[in-house]
Every structure is written in structure tokens, then in C-alpha cells.
Image (cartoon, rainbow, N blue to C red):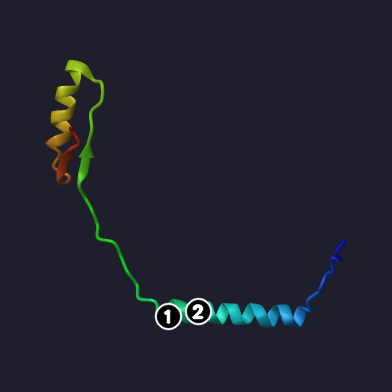
Amino acid sequence: MSKITKKSISRREFLKNTGRIAAASALAAAVVPRIYAAQNNTINVALVGCGGRGSGAAGDALSSKMGPTRSLSE
């Protein structure tokens, strides 16, 4: 059987390694360019299983003045 040895790390070594990781992370964050996604304000409208009563609700939703709308029909 193999022996399992537990190697303890001193507090000083732990803090030194943690500081190195923090410095590397800060450097990587400063070097990487910031990328932002474009905003999509389209209102998607889908109507499932509403029968005859749903046509008025769908028409109201598609005529919204708050932004561009798109019907999700197949």
C-alpha cells in the first residue's frame, strides 16, 4: 500500500501564493479588452392555444407603442 503524506503549507507560503494569483488576475483583467453585447429591444409575441379569444390579445400585443414587435409564428 502506498503511504499518503500530508504536506502542510505555512501561512507565509499561502499568503505569497494568494498574492501572486491576485496580481495575475488583476493584470489579466487590465489587458483583456471589454466587450459589450448590443441591446435588443424587440418585443417577441407568441400565442399558444388561445382559440378565438386570443386573436384580439395578439393584435393588441403586436400594436404596442413601446418598441418594435415580432410575431413568433411558424
**Residue 21 left/right relative to 44:** right
Residue 3 sits above or below residue 63 on the image: below
Residue lying farthest to the top in this orientation: 52
The reply to whether discs 1 and 2 touch (Cβ–Cβ < 8 Å) is yes
Q: Residue lying at the far front in this picture: please name it.
A: 1
Q: Position of residue 71 (x, y in %)?
A: 16, 36
Left-right relation of 57 to 12: left
In terms of image quadrants, where is residue 63? top left
Looking at the image, which is closer to me, 12 or 9?
Answer: 9
* Residue wearing tag 2: 26
Q: Quadrant of residue 37?
A: bottom left
Residue drawn at point x = 62 percent, y = 81 percent: 19
Count of number-bearing discs: 2
In what element is the residue under mark 2?
helix
Q: Tell me the crowding category of disc 1: few under 14, some 14 to 19, or many 20 or more residues within 10 angstroms, Cα based.
A: few
Looking at the rendering, which quadrant does residue 32 occupy? bottom left
Locate the C terminus by quadrant: top left
Q: Which residue is mark 1?
A: 30
Label 1 sits on a secondary structure element that is helix
Structural distance between the alpha carbons of marks 1 and 2:
6 Å
Q: Quadrant of the N terminus?
A: bottom right
Residue 65 image offset from top left, x and y in percent: 13, 42
Residue 28 coordinates in the image, percent (x, y): 46, 78
The residue closer to the viewer here, 32 or 7, is 7
Position of residue 72 measured from the top left corner of the image (x, y, whole percent): 20, 36
- Given the image, on which type of amino acid does mark 1 rest? Ala
Which residue is painted at 14% across and 46% down in the image? Answer: 68
Amino acid type at circle 2 is Ala
- Judged left or right of residue 8, residue 41 is left
Q: Is residue 29 above or below residue 3?
A: below
